[in-house]
Image (spheres, helix red, strand yellow):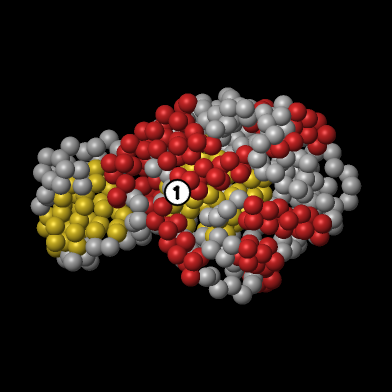
Amino acid sequence: MKKTTLCLLFFSMSCITMLAQTYTPTEGNLKNRKEFQDDKFGMFIHFGPYSVLGNGEWIMNNDNIKVTEYGRLINVFNPQNFDAKKWVGIAKAAGMKYITFTTRHHDGFSNFDTKLSDWKITNTHFKRDLLKELADECHKEGIKLFCYYSLLDWTRTDYQYETGKTGKGTGRTAKSDWESYIRFMKGQLTEILTNYGEIGGIWFDGHWDQLDNDTDKTLSSKVNWHYDEIYKLIHSIQPNCLISNNHHLLPIQGEDFQAFEKDLPGGNTTGFGGQSVSQLPLETCETMNNSWGFDINDRKYKSTKDLLHYMINAASLNANFLLNVGPMADGSIQPEFVETLKEMGIWMDKNGKSIYGTRGNVMPQQDWGVFTAKDKTLFAHIIKTPKQAEYIFIPEMKQKIKKCYLMDGKKELKFKQQPEGTFVYLDGTKIDTIDTIIEMQIQ
């Protein structure tokens, strides 16, 4: 996950066409896309040797730590308190339906027992295959497992670091070998999709490291990521597995859902977004403080209310909400995250029917809130105090309401529909500090 703002230079349409392939999703893949949209809420987990240093997952790049020095972390990274049951239990109690786990981040460290690299968790004092234990527990508890996989690598010499935008200070001098690196990635993806049971999806990141380099015209950064081959490989092993790529572009052929980073679909408050919104299933990911990987000094925790509002707004735009935790180096999730997730789970247990299985983009956002919908039911989420205490106004509402009531307690509400819009009268309803949900049965 990017921590610094990168200048995003979009590929031309010819380049996008070059990457494209002929792709027809299987029936099972389409079914998984729908289930993915229904699930709405997932846990992102950033974890690796960088957790030992307690300064985020980009510390190797940010502090220009040499490969040899960074590699010594294999001797001290020992998540002895890791418990797959606890991780999955925390996610499940929060109302999360899937987990996206960093099998390999930009530092190249593999959180699984790969045969293709010695830079892996089973060569630490921990010795165990963390991904295997997590996968087994997810399958046991009915939580879907998605695997984050970094396309770039700050440690391998065969990665084309000469044209990359990051990892310049890690001390690599040997000439890269791009074909070797592509073979390595294919091999690792084959291991993940073969040895760990059903994988809900592969979540790629790092494409943006090899965008056009305007500062040095002597370098050719028109890198062919071989997506046609990689995506075909994934779908050949597990046809129903979903693929996403956090490349900050419109999806290309072979991808099954579209990812947005630290922004709602179509937004660009962070510099990572701004791309058009596709018709594929959507997902936006966000942190609980400001960091993806564990940062001992980051105390800027988002409130439960803010995170619930983020999820509600995402659902109103037809997007899932992937909320990140960065476990501490010992493998435990810090208590501040656990407490907030517990509170979110209590809210979801009570109000989840207005989120799970719903679809968005059914009504424009209003100054008081947003909408989600399922079948013949509209959910109006009042997340800001209405300007008029007596009612909410929905302009130009085309749907005809049969019945209208508070979702909490089923208190029936009066309404009036006119050509210019619909009035729903609150009848003294006390506005909830997080969300007052009005359920509308429509014809």
Q: Position of residue 16 (x, y in %)?
A: 65, 68
**Left or right of residue 297: residue 180:** right
Residue 294 placement: quadrant: top right
Can the viewer see residue 183? yes
**Viewer can see residue 7:** no
Q: Quadrant of the C terminus?
A: bottom left
| Label 1: element kind | loop
Picture coordinates of residue 133, whole percent (x, y): 58, 41
Q: What quarter of the picture does the N terminus occupy?
A: top right
In the depicted view, which residue is nearer to us: 185 or 165?
185
Instruction: Give the quarter of the image for residue 332.
Output: top right
Taking 135 as reference, is 408 left or right?
Answer: left
Q: Which residue is most to the right? A: 174
Percent of width and height locating residue 398: 22, 66
344 versus 10 height, above or below: above
Image point (19%, 59%), residue name: 441
Q: For the point 76% across and 40% down, which residue is it?
A: 119
- Image: 179 above or below 332: below
Could you tell whether 31 is left or right of 52 in the image?
A: left
The residue where tag 1 is placed is 142
Q: Which sits in the foreground, 254 or 380?
A: 254
Going 45% across and 45% down the picture, which residue do you hit?
Answer: 141
Q: Is residue 443 above or below residue 129?
A: below
